[in-house]
Image: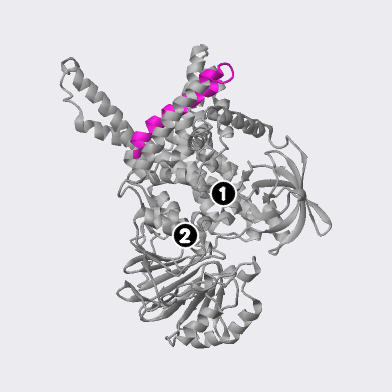
Amino acid sequence: MKLLSASRQPFVGLAIAAAVGIICADFVALPQLALLPATILTVIGAVSLLIWSRLFLAYLLVGSGFFLIHSFQQKESEGLWLAWRLSERPRVVTVIGSVVSEPKIATSGFASFLLKLKSIELEGRRKRTTATVFVRWSGNPQFGDELRLFGIAEPIEPPRNPGEFDMRSYLGRRDVRRLVFVRYPENGVILRHGGGNPVLRVAQKSRAWMQTTLCRGLEGAPDVQSFLSGIVLGLRHQTPEDIEEPFQQTGTLHLFAVAGLHVGIVARLLWMLTTVAQLSRRWAAALIIPLLLFYAAITGLHISSVRAAVMSSILLGGLFFDRKVLALNSLAAAAFFLLSWNTNELFSTGFQLSFAVVGTIILLADPASALLRRLTAPDPFLPRSLIRTPRRIFDSFVIALSRGASVSLAAWIGSLALLLWYFYLVTPISLFANLVVVPIAFFVLAIALLSLACAPLLPWCALVFNNANWLLARLVLAIVHFFAQFPGGHYYFEHPHWPERAVLKLNVLDTGAGAAVHARTGGGDWLFDCGSERDYERLLRAYLHAAGVNRLRGLLLTHGDSQHIGGAAPLLSEMQPATLMDNPSPDRSSVHRRLRARFRELGLAPQLLNAGDEIRLSDEVIAKILFPPREFSASTADEQSLVVHLITSSARILLMSDSGEATERSLMSSHVDLRSDILVKGQNHSTQSGSDVFLDATQPRLIVATSRDFPEYEHVSDEWAERVRARGIKLFRQDETGAVELIFRREDWQARAYITGEVLRSSSR
C-alpha cells in the first residue's frame, strides 16, 4: 500500500474525508439549532489538531468541516430564500440580473440561460437578492448582458416519465430553484452589454472566434463542424443527437468532454513553444499554468476540463518548485479543491465520471500494460544485439498496443458502474473503439490547434489544416457508426430491482396530447403507439433505454394521428420491432401515408388489425381487438382508432386511444364484453368521451386519462372528473400524475403515479 501512503499522497485521504463528510450531510440533515454547536466543536477540533497532531484527527476535522459547509448550503442559500419568498404557485415578477451561462437557443426560438439576480420585484415591492434563476425568453441575450425581464416565476417541473432528465434536481444542486418564463421578446430589455466576469467574457469571445476559424471552409459539412466544435472546444450542446448517440454507444463520448487528452495536447504544444523560446523549466511552468486554466474557461469550465487543468497545473507546479509530483495525489488535490469551491459537485455525473475514470487509469493502466507486454516479451536473458529488426518492430508495436489497450480497459472498468447507473448502458465495444478512435482524435485536436495558431497570420494555411481535419473527422464518424452497429457492442439494462413476479407491466407514458404505452410481458416488449417525432426524441427513446429495451417484440399503431405515430420512423430503425401492426382504415393523415411508404421501402408488411383479431403477447396475456370492424371508415381518424382489450388472470385493461362517443356507441351495440378494471383513454378532438352509459358498460375501478392545458379539447374537464369520482372510480389524470405504471400479477394488480407517488391496489376498498 506504499502507493496510497499518507506521507506520499496526503490529498488522497483528505479528498476521501471531504467526500464522506459531504455524503453524510446530504443524507443526515442536522436541525438548524444543531449547526452552531457543531461549528464550535469543529473549531475546537482544529485547535486540538495544532496541539496534538494525529492523522486520524486531521481526517475527522476535514470530514466535519465539509459536513458543516454542505449543511449550511442545504439550509441557508439565496436560492432557497427566493423559493420560499415566491411559494409554490406561479407569480408575476420583474427581475434584473446578469446572464451567467451561455444561452442555448431551442428550435422554438426560446433562449435558455441562467440569470444571476440583482433584484426582484413582486407585487409592487422590490427586494435585492443574489439568487440565480433559470430563464426562458424568446430574445437574443449574450453572456454577461444585464437584463430586465417581466414574466412568470414558477417551480421547475420535475420529470414526468421514467428515464427523463431531471432538470429540477440538476439545477437544484446549483441552488437554482425557480424558472422565469418570459413569453414575448418585448417583455425583456437588455440594459447593457459586456457585464459579468471579465475573464469568462473574454473566454466566451475567444471560443466564438475559435469556432468560426475551425469551421472556415467546412460550410457544406455541418456534421463535421459539430464534431470539431465538440471535440476541440467542448461545445457538446451544439452536437445533434444523431451524431452524439453513436459516440455514447461506443464509449467514445468522452471525446466531446474536454479533459486530460485535450489539456495534455495543449500543454505539450505550449511546452514545445517555450522550449523553442529557450525559457527555463520554471518560467515555462509559470506561463503554461494560467494558459491551461484559460483553456478550461474557453471550453465552458466543465468538470472534466477544470479537473484536467488543475491536475496539470499541480504537476507543472512540481517543476516550478523542483518537487516530485505523484499523479494520484494530484488527482485527489484537484478533487479536494473543486469540492472546496462547491460541495454539490460531488453529486454531478461529470465529476464522478471524470475522477473515477482517471483514478482507475492511474491505478490499473501500468500494471495491465506490464502484464500484456510480459505475454509477448522476448527472453530477458537474450542480448539486445541478437534481436532482429522485424522482432524489434513487432515489440515496439506490442508496447504501443498494450499501452493503449491497458488505458482503454482501465477507463472502461472505471466508468462501467457509472454508465450503467446514469445511462443504463454497457459498452464492451468501447475496448476496441477507443483503441482506433483516440489516436485519430489526437491528430484531429493537434491539427485544430495548429489551424488556430496559423489563422491570424496565415489564413490560407488554416484552411489547409481545416480540410485535413475534414478528412479525419469523416473517418472518425464512419468508424464510430460502424462500431455502434456492431452486434452485441452495447446493451441497455434496466436498473436492478426486487423481482415483481409480474405477468404484465404497463407504463402509460405522459406525452401530452399523444400516446405511448409500453407493455412488458414474458413474451418481450410491446409498444402501443409511440408519440410524435418530437416525443420520441425527447421522451420515448430515453424511457426505452432506462427500461432496458434493446429491441421491441411488437409495435401497434392505433390510428393516423401524428401525435400518436409520428415517432414510428426513427423507432423502426433503432428498435427494429419483430412484429408491426397497423390500423387498415383509410384516413387523410399525411404522416400515416409517409409511414406506409416507409414500410414498403423497408420491405415490411404490417399486420392489419380489425375487430375480432387476437394477439398473444405471452402465455398469460392476450390482446383482443374490439374496434374498428372490417371495411370501416369514419369522418375523423380519432373515431376509427384501434380499441384493444388486454386480458390477464387478474385484470382487464381497455385501451381506448382517442376514441369518442361514436366509437363508444358502436362498441356497446356490438354486445362485446366491455367490463374492465382499468380504462386508459385519450381526448377526442371533436366530441366528448367517457360517457356515463359507457362507464356503466365498462365498470372500471381506475381511469388513466391524458390531459394537457392547451388546446382546450385536450384538457380533462372538471365536470367530467367530478362525475367519475362520484361513481367511486379512481382518476389518474396525467397532467397531475405524469406517467402511470401498472403492474399485474396472477392474483392482483397495482397502479402508481410517477410524479405524486400515489398507489392504487386492486385490494384497496
Residue toward you, 619 or 59: 619
Q: Are marks 1 and 2 in contact (CB under 8 Å)?
A: no
> How far across and how far down the image is residue 562, in percent?
52, 61
Where residue 254 appears, x then y in whole percent? 44, 40
Q: Amino acid at mark 1?
A: Asn
Q: Which residue is mark 2?
A: 593
- The residue at which mark 1 appears reads as 344
| Picture residue at 83% right of the left edge, 56% below the top | 125
Image quadrant holding the N terminus, namely top left
Image depth: mark 1 or mark 2 in front: 2
Crowd class of label 2 (few under 14; some 14 to 19; many from 20; radius 10 Å)? some
Residue at x 60% of width, y 48% of height: 107
Element under disc 1:
helix
Front position in the image: 666 or 273: 666
Which residues fall within the magenta stretch? Answer: 433-461
Q: x, y (%) of residue 618? A: 31, 72
Q: Say which amino acid is labelled 2.
A: Arg
The answer to whether residue 164 of the structure is visible from this angle is no
Residue 251, numbered label: none
Magenta span has 89? no
**Residue 301 picture location, percent across and down:** 57, 37
**Residue drawn where x is 57% and y is 83% of the image:** 691
Classify mark 2: helix, strand or loop.
helix
Mark nearer the N terminus (1 vs 2): 1
For residue 46, above or below residue 151: above
- Cα gap from disc 1 to disc 2, whole angstroms: 50 Å
| Number of numbered labels in the structure image | 2
